[in-house]
Amino acid sequence: MSKVVSTKQQLEKLVALMEENPQFSRGICTKVQAATQWEGFALELNCLGPPTRPAAKWMKVWADMKSKTKKKLSQNKAEYRATGGGTNRLQGFSNTEESIIGILEFNACINPPGAEFGLDISGDVEPQLSAPPNPTPHPQAENLRKVKWSFILRLTSLQHAKSGQLKNATRQRG
């Protein structure tokens, strides 16, 4: 069995039909609606010339196109995250693939909007860090500060005393 290759015209028409029916292209419909819609699409696509296919085969073509585009987009994202070294392996997208990405909103799937590490990273909003809701210090924090300072004062006084003792000891020997 030989592989049947669709023409560029047919593929562009398939993408155009999906752009006209974005809910259908995402699979948001009943099985009955999908069957009748695919029959209509098959008629339009088969009118563009050989190869001709039944509706089920055109469904498979659309699924393959979506899968190939999503895989390419995912590989590009992995390449962006690479640590460097070696050649650039980013893959370009054809106009048809760009349209598929737009129709199915694959960018939102691969790079979801929303909070990342507690910051809002949506396009229009600049991330802002907010102050804690209650800026009053913990009751024990003041005690810890006092203990810390008393320790530092004792340590410095001990260091001064030792340095003074060393100076006195060297004067007595000399």
Image: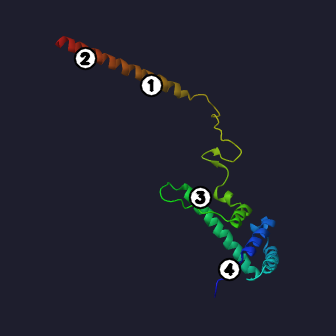
Rendered location of residue 87, percent (x, y): 50, 60
Tell me the quarter of the image containing the N terminus. Answer: bottom right
Observer-side mark, 1 or 3, equals 3
Mark 1 vs 4, N-terminal side:
4
Q: Amino acid at mark 2?
A: Leu
For mark 3, give the secondary structure: helix
Label 1 sits on residue: 148
Contact, mark 2 vs mark 3 (Cβ under 8 Å): no
For mark 4, give the secondary structure: loop
Label 3 sits on residue: 77
What separation in Å lies between label 2 and label 3 (alpha carbons)? 66 Å
Q: Amino acid at mark 1?
A: Lys
What separation in Å lies between label 4 and label 2 (alpha carbons)? 94 Å
Please give left or right for residue 114 compared with residue 163 in the image: right
What separation in Å lies between label 1 and label 3 (alpha carbons)? 49 Å
What separation in Å lies between label 2 and label 1 (alpha carbons)? 27 Å
From the viewer's side, name the closer residue of 150 and 15: 15
Label 4 sits on residue: 5
Q: Amino acid at mark 4?
A: Val
Mark 2 vs 3, N-terminal side:
3
Observer-side mark, 2 or 3, equals 3
Rendered location of residue 132, percent (x, y): 63, 34
Instruction: Give the image quarter of residue 41.
Output: bottom right
Contact, mark 4 vs mark 2 (Cβ under 8 Å): no
Instruction: Give the image quarter of residue 161.
Output: top left
Mark 3 packing: few (<14 Cα in 10 Å), some, or many (20+)?
A: some
Q: Is residue 30 above or below residue 149?
A: below
